Image: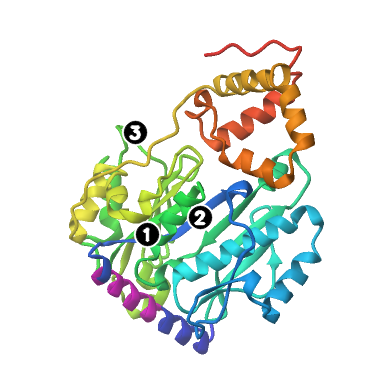
Amino acid sequence: MTRPAKSSLVLDGRAIKARLEAERLETSSMVHVDWVRFTVRLRHAVTLRLVHVPASTSNAYVDIAQQGDYRIQELRHMIGQLPEVVQDAAGQAATLADRVAGMLGEGFARASMMGKGHDFYKHRWPILRNDVECGWVGFGASSDSPRQAAQASTIHVNLFGAACTFAADGWREKIAALVDELEADITRCDLAVDFFDGFKGGIERVVDQYKQGLCDSMGRKLKVKDINFVRGSERSLYIGSKEAGKETNIYEKGDMLFGEEAGSDWLRFELRYGNKLRVISSDILRRPADFFAGASEWHASVLAEAGEVAEPERVKCRGRLPLLNVEAEAFQNLKWAFNTAGATIATVWRLLSDEDLFRLVDSSKVPRRLQRFTPSELKIAFAAAMSRSVVSEPCPALA
């Protein structure tokens, strides 16, 4: 690594530490939200109406109907180059990127140009801070596979650690409200507790705690993986697993930011929640300390040692209802639609305007029998139910 790059890294590290320390004073909490991802279904996303404008403008957002700015024309032209089937998704994603950037605060903005997508999304709108990407909003499927077809009906927001660290005070509550408004699913949220001046006993003490069973969860020994322990610097210890949706990375962040030669004792405990087996509430953004403490008694003890006692709240695992039970309910619902309501649905579809159809669909709630399932479970179940003949095949037995 060259000296200029190293110098730049140290300066960035100092800025990160200063911002994290300031955040503690602002929020009176020892827990920092370091990464957030959430997915929005297209039918819930806001339409292409608001576009971000420079901070020098008094109003952060401008109604397209009242704005003839070249930026709006450029955006419309860019979206118009896409296949018609993804143009609406592109517009909704651009609007969502603008809203998120505005909530992060001054200095954040949606990039003027689309980029290549990530994580199986075909396109993305980068979110920038000081012209450096710190997040993105993805849309469009990268293939025609059945799984990607389902993904094409969503747009996805991914906010990196840089966005979460340098966002303005109050950003978490604003994003939480947005998640609730759009009925979004949080797919990842990282919660970090920093010991800037060192954790008594260092990372070796955490290893001993793991061996003693203090890091066990509900009586079970969790998976463990270590990195760089032979090297002796920039060490990481991973406890738990991504597959289970709860993994804690304990690592020497001072070494990572400043280099081994700096002799920094900064140790970070970073709890990473995922939605593979769990339902992540938007409250995790409002009360991150409670959810950090709720991971296990050991996590609560770490937080207490950092100087905060919270009211533990678990990120609950999904109810272990058999998939067959979800599919059975979907099957029954579809069979009723085909056999009983089919004529009415067909008539409404043929005679109502698109606007009236949208108003009918958007204002309708999920049937009560289906409300106990998550949107992702229902999406899978309805696809499976439609793959069989909903008229002739027998319904799978209800569990």
Visible residue check, residue 370: yes
Residue 220 got which mark? 3
Q: Position of residue 366 (x, y in %)?
A: 54, 32
Residue at coordinates 44% horizontally, 73% vertically from top-left?
105
Mark 2 neighbour class, 10 Å CA radius: few under 14, some 14 to 19, many 20 or more: many
- Tag in front: 3 or 1: 1
Q: Quadrant of residue 82?
A: bottom right
- Tag in front: 3 or 2: 2
Mark 3 vs mark 2, CA separation in Å: 28 Å
Q: Position of residue 57 (x, y in %)?
A: 51, 83
In screen coordinates, is 372 left or right of 323? Answer: left
Residue for badge 1: 173
Disc 1 marks a residue whose amino acid type is Glu
Dot 2 or dot 1, earlier in sequence: 2
In screen coordinates, is 45 left or right of 185? Answer: right
Q: Position of residue 197 (x, y in %)?
A: 24, 71
Q: Which residues are magenta?
A: 13-25
Mark 2 vs mark 1, CA separation in Å: 15 Å
Along the viewing direction, whichever of 203 and 164 lies nearer the viewer: 164
Along the viewing direction, whichever of 106 and 272 lies nearer the viewer: 106
Residue at coordinates 40% horizontally, 49% vertically from top-left?
282
Dot 3 or dot 1, earlier in sequence: 1
Disc 2 marks a residue whose amino acid type is Arg
Residue for badge 2: 37
- The reply to whether the C-beta atoms of the residues labelled 3 and 1 are less than 8 Å apart is no
- The answer to whether 112 is drawn above or below residue 313 in the figure is below
Q: Residue furthest bottom?
A: 4
Mark 1 neighbour class, 10 Å CA radius: few under 14, some 14 to 19, many 20 or more: some
Residue at coordinates 48% horizontally, 81% vertically from top-left?
58
Mark 3 vs mark 1, CA separation in Å: 34 Å
